[in-house]
Image (spheres, rainbow, N blue to C red):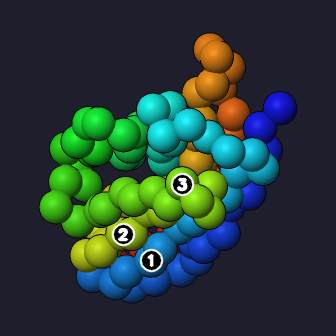
Amino acid sequence: QVQLVQSGGGLVPAGGSLTLSCTASETIFSSIPMGWYRQAPGKQRELVARIRSGRDPDYMDSVMGRFTISRDNARKTVYLQMNRLKPEDTAVYYCNVRNSGIDYWGQGAQVTVSS
């Protein structure tokens, strides 16, 4: 069973930056997507960004050009660099790996962007 441990998050003013990281307990093959989701109060969890080898990363439209997902397979870690943050980016962010049809989730990290 894959365990995902997140770090990062916090409170930042609008226009600021934050970096989230997520480290897996075991090697994740580069062909298996690793991603970030977020869930704002009263809303469904939504995909923010996803990365896997051989394909361009996927981003939700509202973060395109502001967020960058990257992955260090040797460190078993995926990152989400978030720039030019907006109040509407406020949510709990979760990292995700889907392996053999099973979703694994990190513990979540609160990101709050003040206006």
Quadrant (top left/top right/bottom left/bottom right) for the C terminus: bottom left
Residue on which the image places disc 3: 73
Residue annotated with mark 2: 82
Q: Between marks 2 and 3, how big is the CA–CA gap?
A: 20 Å
Q: Position of residue 85 (x, y in %)?
A: 32, 72
- The Cα atoms of the two marked residues, 2 and 1, are separated by 5 Å
Q: Is residue 96 left or right of residue 58?
A: right
> Quick check: 26 above or below 82?
above
Give the mark nearest the N terminus, 2 or 3. 3
Q: Tell me, yes or no, whether the two marked residues, 2 and 1, touch with CB atoms within 8 Å.
A: yes
Q: CA distance from mark 3 to mark 1?
A: 21 Å
Residue 11 % position (x, y): 53, 80
Query: Which element is circle 2 on?
Result: strand
The type of residue carrying mark 2 is Met
User: Does residue 80 appear anywhere in the picture?
Assistant: yes
Taking the spot 27% from the left edge, 82% from the top edge, the residue there is 15
The label shown at residue 18 is 1
